[in-house]
Amino acid sequence: MTQQADYTGEVSPGGAPDRRTAGALEITKLAVDPEMHNNCYLLRCTDTGDQVLIDAADEAHRLLELIGDGGLTAVVTTHQHWDHHRALAEVVAGTGATVIAGTPDADAITEQTGVTVDQRVGADDRIQVGTCSLVVIPVAGHTPGSICLLYDDGSGRPHLWTGDCLFPGGVGNTQGDAERFTQLIGDVSTRIFDALPDETWFYPGHGNDSTLGVERPHVEEWRERGW
């Protein structure tokens, strides 16, 4: 596995993307929208050139420039919230990409964007990026159909895209709803922390990256504080 030693994942809206390679997967992180600071991730298989975008959040012109002439196989929308799919219609129109989302959020995404979700996914479904494979992990609570995506190249350091389910310092916002928080912290605990090693590097929907090892000692603190 090749990992760029200078990759930090610290990107800013309007600034340059950050890029690394893991196995046959090239990962490019780009931040958009100075107010919401959304992260968009372009994944490219170095074996085939196939590309998949995670969250067409905003600034379609920048995303289309990043995609370039290589085409786009699919856009995965991690969840239904408006700030994660503002550029979806324009990116799909410009590339013809398949639209993928978690089943419980798919109708809402279509209602908000006017874009049909072509592929509805759930637990253990796989999304191909050329020869690379992303495994779908549903994590409810932030929204009913939020999904995380796991890439494991066998190196012992998996890569996980968490949308707004998990961030450095805590889980996603549940707007003070105790039931939703219980669902979210439960799913994050059992489906992510209990299932994956400390070396797992995760990429959230906003802000900086982290690893499960850095965050693991604090999970019970998050549970106790209730957010």
Image (cartoon, rainbow, N blue to C red):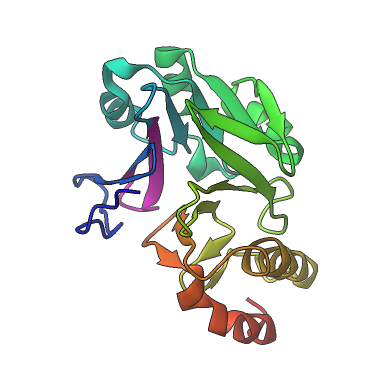
In the displayed structure, 68 sits above or below 10; it is above
Q: Which of 120 and 132 is in front in this view?
A: 132
Picture quadrant where residue 87 is located: top left
Q: Position of residue 64 (x, y in %)?
A: 32, 24
- Asked if residue 113 lies left or right of residue 54, the reply is right
Magenta region includes residue 31: yes
Magenta region: which residues?
Answer: 28-44
Picture quadrant where residue 66 is located: top left
Q: Which quarter of the figure is the C terminus placed in?
A: bottom right
At a point 45% along the width and 77% down the height, the residue shown is 214
In the displayed structure, 117 sits above or below 136; it is above
- Asked if residue 144 lies left or right of residue 192, the reply is right
At a point 33% along the width and 33% down the height, the residue shown is 59
Q: Can residue 105 be seen in this view?
A: yes
Q: Where is residue 141 in the image (x, y as percent from the top left)?
A: 71, 59
Picture quadrant where residue 210 is located: bottom left
Magenta region includes residue 21: no
Q: Where is residue 18 in the image (x, y as percent from the top left)?
A: 25, 48
- Magenta stretch, main secondary structure, is strand
Q: Which of 195 and 102 is in front in this view?
A: 195
At a point 56% along the width and 83% down the height, the residue shown is 218
